Amino acid sequence: MCQGEIKTVGLIFTRKKIKRSGFIGLEDYAIKRGIRIIHIDLSIPIEDQGKLDLIVHKMTDVIAKVERGDLEAKKLYERFINYCKSNPNVVVIDAWSNIEKVLDRMVLYHHTEICAMESIKENYPLFNVPKSIALNSIDEWKSKEIDVRFPAMCKRRTACSSTEAHQMTLIPSIEKMDQLKNYVEDNEAVIVQEFIQHDGVIVKVYVAEGQITASTRPSFKNMDKTGDVVHFDSQTLPKSFETEIELSDDLDKVFLKKDPSHIHIQKEALLDYNRLQQIANSLYCQLGLTFFGFDVLLQSKTNAYYVVDVNYFPSFKDVDNFHSMFVDILEKKLT
């Protein structure tokens, strides 16, 4: 980037995502480094909003509406795609062909599985992926062999940017699969994923152009097959231990809300950041995403690494120095 030359970067994010993604105050910081940040309004032609050098987007929000039959959202999506085709010199983070890999959890599962099979560390897999099966409807389980171990987690196949994507159900045994009909529409496609015992601690890893940041959060206690079915919204789960957030009675029984024995500190001490970096590198090579996150569980007793989810452009607001990291990436892409 030439000295003194101002470049313009357009963001396509909902206002809600702007607040949650770590962008507050970004414009003031970026302009000091020669980058003008603007917010693109897809309801009007993008060409009318000034000359752009680069676009950073989370169009998955729009796609979620398109998949629900929203015709206005379809127009916004087509406007974005047509602009990208008509303006090939404008850098786009990230390419739509890569975004499509993370829209469906089953497709994402297969991509993650490829990474797990190809990544070997000292004759062992760098990480594992819990076995998952796809159901086109919840009734399909009656006629399809459910070749996963229980307890299991039921998730919508839709992976991004919709209320449904965050609705999940913990199923202790196959005998209780019938209860899914209380939480999932008959024609909704879901995946059933084996529950990995992990002592109530999940590791959240954030990746920005290969740079990782990791932290632990509370999660589900070790489960057996005798409990109740538990339905929850993953976005409302506590994000720190000793939280004051009130949980429903059924969720409170199975979630490690408080950690008096400091299991999360023990897990943090076990974390191999070199391994996490290698996992991030493997996922990046497979998915081609600049900004993403993934969830890791350290299996109870064995401490084997399991990647249970990958998220496109999660919230980076708790990542230290995200503004400088973000602008560094923009500068690199613009040169």
Image: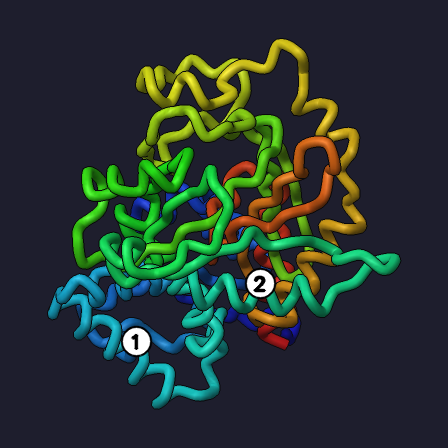
Q: Which of 94 and 56 is in front in this view?
A: 94
- Considering the numbered disc 1 on the image, is that residue within a helix, a strand or a loop? helix
On the image, the x and y values in percent for residue 129 come to 59, 54
Distance of label 1 from label 2 (alpha carbons):
28 Å
For image coordinates 52% across by 45% down, the residue present is 316
The answer to whether residue 288 shows anywhere in this view is yes
Q: Which is more N-terminal, label 2 or label 1?
A: 1
Position of residue 150 relative to residue 269, above or below, is below
- Considering the numbered disc 2 on the image, is that residue within a helix, a strand or a loop? helix
Residue at the spot of label 1: 80
On the image, the x and y values in percent for residue 146 come to 41, 54
Position of residue 119 relative to residue 229, above or below, is below
Quarter of the figure with residue 234 = top left
Along the horizontal axis of the image, is 40 left or right of 195?
A: left
Residue at the spot of label 2: 112
Q: Which residue lies furthest to the top in this view?
A: 260
For image coordinates 33% across by 33% down, the residue present is 232
On the image, the x and y values in percent for residue 27 come to 46, 52
Along the horizontal axis of the image, is 30 left or right of 283?
A: left
The answer to whether residue 323 shows anywhere in this view is no
Mark 1 or mark 2, whichever is nearer to me: 2
Q: Given the image, on which type of amino acid does mark 2 rest?
A: Thr
On the image, the x and y values in percent for residue 125 come to 75, 58
For image coordinates 67% across by 12% down, the residue present is 261
For image coordinates 64% across by 60% down, the residue present is 328
Q: Which quarter of the rendering shows the C terminus? A: bottom right
